[in-house]
Amino acid sequence: MSKNESFRFYAAEVSYFSGKVRPIFRYKGIPYEEIDPTPQVYRDVIEPRTGLRFIPIVVTPEDQTLQDTSEILDALEARFPNPPVYPTTPVQRVVAYLIEVYADEFMVLPAMHYRWSFTESEAKARADFAKASGNPETASKFADRMKGMIPLLGVTPESGPAIEAHLRELLDILSAHFAHHDFLFGSRMSLGDLALMGPLYAHLYLDAVPGRLLSETAPRVCAWIERMNHPVPRSGEFLANDALPPMLRPLLDLIGRDAAPLILDNVHAFEEWAATRPSDMTEPPRAVGAHSTSLRGTPLQRYTSPYTSWMLQRPLDAYGALPAGGRAAVDAALAGSGLERWLAWKPNPRMGKKHFKLVFAG
Ligand SMILES: N[C@@H](CCC(=O)N[C@@H](CS)C(=O)NCC(=O)O)C(=O)O
């Protein structure tokens, strides 16, 4: 395979969203090379191609740029459809999309808490950033900015105990699940597994303090992380008959209890803001003020992210595309979990993407 038939993956080991994408290349046997995000790469590749300073990005062999991990995975799944990592049966498919929202939008709380609230984790993360960037000064400024974001996400000394309790419960559920299955829906990785790798691998496994927590209390989760990063290409199956493994129900209950209200508070705050936006505004800013929410009874203030609405449209669209019988099966699987509320949401405004930017889409 010549070099220009490879996909270029601009990414870093300790980057949340890079962790979400890397295993799909390996599982599907897609030729790729991973390129460190040095200051020069930001200046010469990432910024000119996307107008943004986000990693990861993917450049296809035809020189097309893909940005945003959800769109990267969609594009790779469409181009290399067999075997699918997006389940094709209704319940598994919608649950995979719901887990993607949880992993991308809620799991930033434990991921950022365990990286930046502990001196030992912070020191290792700073060293890891410097290695990835090759420029300690730029890396240090980036680390300062990331650390500075944690109060905006709702990560504070007051919310730390609730965030930690959530993570412990998640690890227990996943540990029990991985005693019986290699991946969330059977012996093949899925969109849900990929999304969970962002927080669980790139932050919680690699960072100093949570890394110990995982290896001491959740070895089966560590083994899943290794399986995800070193998959047997194209191996495995999703469970037959659209079955949902038994431990996924407690997982859905956990997401429904802790993440569902927090995410809905964000989208409702955004919608309130959007209702009075200037009529000629085409793109929202990255944050539109702050809103109040709570986690396990602890009040939190978080910045209001318009992007969360775009993410929450994904499971809704997957659900809406199903025939009535498929939607009924999903309704039955989610009944009482609290996640029905995500699928009952009516986006207003709908959000879209144009040239890598979030735009109002109606
Ligand atoms: N929704 C985006 C998020 C990408 C993202 O937040 N990437 C982080 C690294 S894991 C980043 O580059 N952050 C820079 C910043 O927040 O300014 C995706 O899925 O690709």
Image: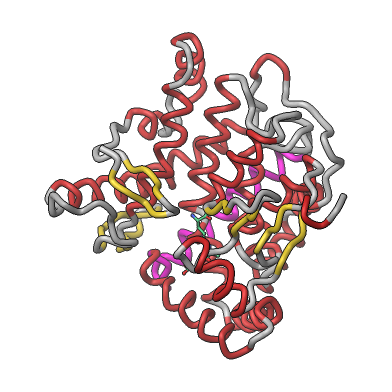
Image height of 28 relative to 120, above or below: above
Q: Nearer the viewer, residue 260 or 360?
A: 360
Image height of 241 relative to 198, above or below: above
Residue at the (54%, 43%) spot, across then down: 100
Residue at the (45%, 31%) spot, across then down: 337
Q: Is residue 225 left or right of residue 162?
A: right
Residue range in magenta is 154-178
Image height of 2 relative to 139, above or below: above
Q: Is residue 171 left or right of residue 43?
A: right
Residue 310: x and y, percent?
A: 39, 44
Q: Nearer the viewer, residue 310 or 177?
A: 310
Q: Is residue 157 left or right of residue 87?
A: left
The residue most toward the bottom is 137
In the picture, residue 59 is in which quadrant?
bottom right
Residue at the (43%, 67%) spot, across then down: 155
The residue most toward the top is 325
Residue 265: x and y, percent?
A: 29, 48
